[in-house]
Image: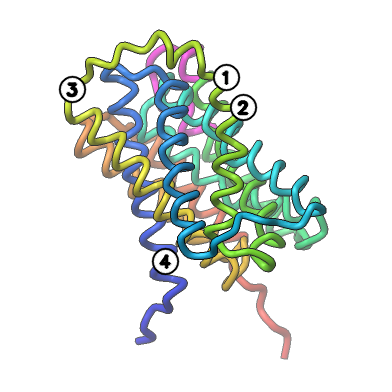
Amino acid sequence: MRRPSSAELMLLATVSIWAFNFTVTRYVLTHGFEPLAYSTLRYAAAAVIFAGVTYGFERSFSVRRRDVPLLLVAAIFGVWLNQVSFTYALTYTTASTAALIMGTLPIFTALIAWAFGFEALTRRFLLAGAISFGGVALVALGSGGDLSGDLRGNLLVLATALTWAAYSVAVVPLMRLYSPFRVSAFVLIAGWVPLALSGARQVLEQDYSLAPLVWACLAFAVVGPLVLTNVLWFTAIERVGPSRATLATNLQPFLAAIFALVLLSERITWLQVAGGLAIGGGILLARRRAPVAD
C-alpha cells in the first residue's frame, strides 16, 4: 500500500482543521459573539501573526506591482466576501447543514478554473454538477426549522463555497512566484481592511464579557484554520494543482457534520444524509477518469 505523500498529509490535516472549525464557529456565534466582530478580531490577529512570521523568514513583503491586482482580488474573495458569508451562514443554519452544502466546493472550483481556461468541462462533469446541486437541494429540504432562515443560511453557505473556490484558483499563479507566507500575509492584511470596515459597528458594540471557552475557540480559529492551514493548503495546491487539492475537501463535509453532531448535539435528517451522499457522489463522478480505449 502506497504511503501518503507530504502534500496529501497536508491536505488531510487542513481538511480536518477546517471541518472542526464549523463546530467552533457555530459555538462562538451562539454564545455571544457577533458575526463580523468575531471575524474582524480573528483576521486582525491572523494578519499580525502572518506579518511577523513572513518578515522573520523573508525579511520582505515586496511583490511586483503587476501582481497587486490579483492579490487584491484574492483578498476580496478569500477574506472579505468569504468571511461575511461564512459567519452569517453559521448564524442562520446549523454547522452540519453548512458543512454538507460546502461539499460543492470542488464543483465551483472546476467551474471557475474552466471559466479562466485552466480546465475543460465534459458531459460527465455537467452530470456530476447536476447531481451535486441536487444533493444541495436535498440537504436544504431536510434542514427543517424556519424556511426563510434556513434558505438564507443555505444560500450564504453556497456563497462561502463560491468565494473560497475563486480564492483557490486566483492564488495558483501567485504561488508560483511567492511563498505561502508572503501571499497569505498580503491577502490577510488586504482582506482585513474591508472586513474591519464592514464590522466596525459590531466590534464597538460587542459585549466582551464572554466565557473562557469562547475565547479559547477564537484562539483556535486564528492559529488553526487561518495561520497553519493557509500555509499547508497553498503549499499543497502548488504541488498538486487546485482541482486535485479541492478533491480532498470531499472529506470535509462529513467530518464537519460528525463534529457538529457529537459536540453540538445537532440533529441531521435522512434527507440531509442522502443529500450529502449525492454531493459526494457527484464529486467522485466528476473526478473519475474516463476509460482509455484499447
- Of the residues under marks 2 and 3, which one precedes in the sequence? 2
Q: Which mark is residue 198?
A: 1
Viewer-side residue, 115 vs 195: 195
Q: Quadrant of residue 35?
A: top left
Q: Residue at x 17, y 28 (%)?
A: 212
Identify the residue position indicated by label 4 in the image.
10
Which element is circle 2 on? Answer: helix
Furthest-left residue in this view: 212
- Circles 2 and 3, Cβ within 8 Å, touching? The answer is no
Viewer-side residue, 262 vs 229: 229
Identify the residue position indicated by label 2 in the image.
194
Identify the residue position indicated by label 3 in the image.
211
Residue 251 in percent (x, y) is at 41, 55
Residue type of the residue flagged with mark 4:
Met
Residue type of the residue flagged with mark 1:
Ser
Mark 2 or mark 4, whichever is nearer to me:
2
Q: Quadrant of residue 208?
A: top left
Q: Quadrant of residue 125?
A: bottom right
